[in-house]
Image (tube, helix red, strand yellow):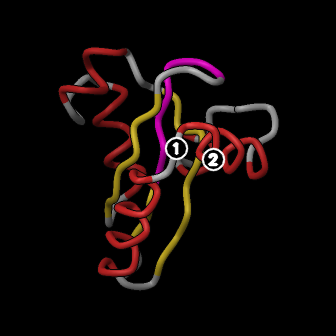
Amino acid sequence: MGSYVYIMTNKPFGMLYTGVTANLPHRVFAHREGRGSAFCRKWGLKMLVFAEAHERIIDAIAREKAIKNWNRVWKLRMISEQNPNWDDLYGQINS
């Protein structure tokens, strides 16, 4: 079973939330509906701007923890390198 590290935001270069899941479309949909996390609900984080696949959940969890320890500039750079226009990737994963 695959797993994902993902980052949600409310706007380009806005507030960031890093999470991990085994079902990316389901988890992002929950965030968009206000059921994903209190943090995302509070700040209106509904845009998926980064997703990284991992074969094992343990690897995804380790990566999530590493990213959460990064400073903001590193996170912004990583997102911008993978998604230069800060597009909402939800449509791509949910098709």
Give above or below for 75 relative to 69: above
Q: Amino acid at mark 1?
A: Asn
Counting other residues with Cα less than 10 Å from the Cα at mark 1, is it few (<14), some (14-19), or many (20 or more)? few
Which quarter of the rendering shows the N terminus? bottom left
* Image side of residue 17 versus residue 72, left or right: left
Q: Judge whether residue 11 is colored magenta.
A: yes
- Residue at 25 percent across and 23 percent down: it is 34
- The quadrant holding residue 80 is top right
Counting other residues with Cα less than 10 Å from the Cα at mark 2, is it few (<14), some (14-19), or many (20 or more)? few
Residue at numbered disc 2:
74
Q: Judge whether residue 28 is colored magenta.
A: no
Q: Amino acid at mark 2?
A: Trp
- Residue 10 pos. (x, y %): 50, 19
* Contact, mark 2 vs mark 1 (Cβ under 8 Å): yes
Q: Decide which of 93, 56 is in the foreground and name it.
A: 56
Q: Decide which of 91, 41 is in the foreground and name it.
A: 41
- Residue 6 pos. (x, y %): 47, 51
Q: Decide which of 65, 21 is in the foreground and name it.
A: 65
- The quadrant holding residue 76 is top right
Give the number of the disc on residue 71: 1
Give above or below for 66 relative to 69: below
Q: How many marks?
A: 2
* Image side of residue 63 versus residue 33, left or right: right
Give the magenta range: 6-12
- Residue at 55 percent across and 37 percent down: it is 72
Q: Secondary structure at mark 1?
A: loop
Q: Secondary structure at mark 2?
A: helix
- Residue 71 pos. (x, y %): 52, 43
Separation of marks 2 and 1 at Cα, in angstroms? 6 Å
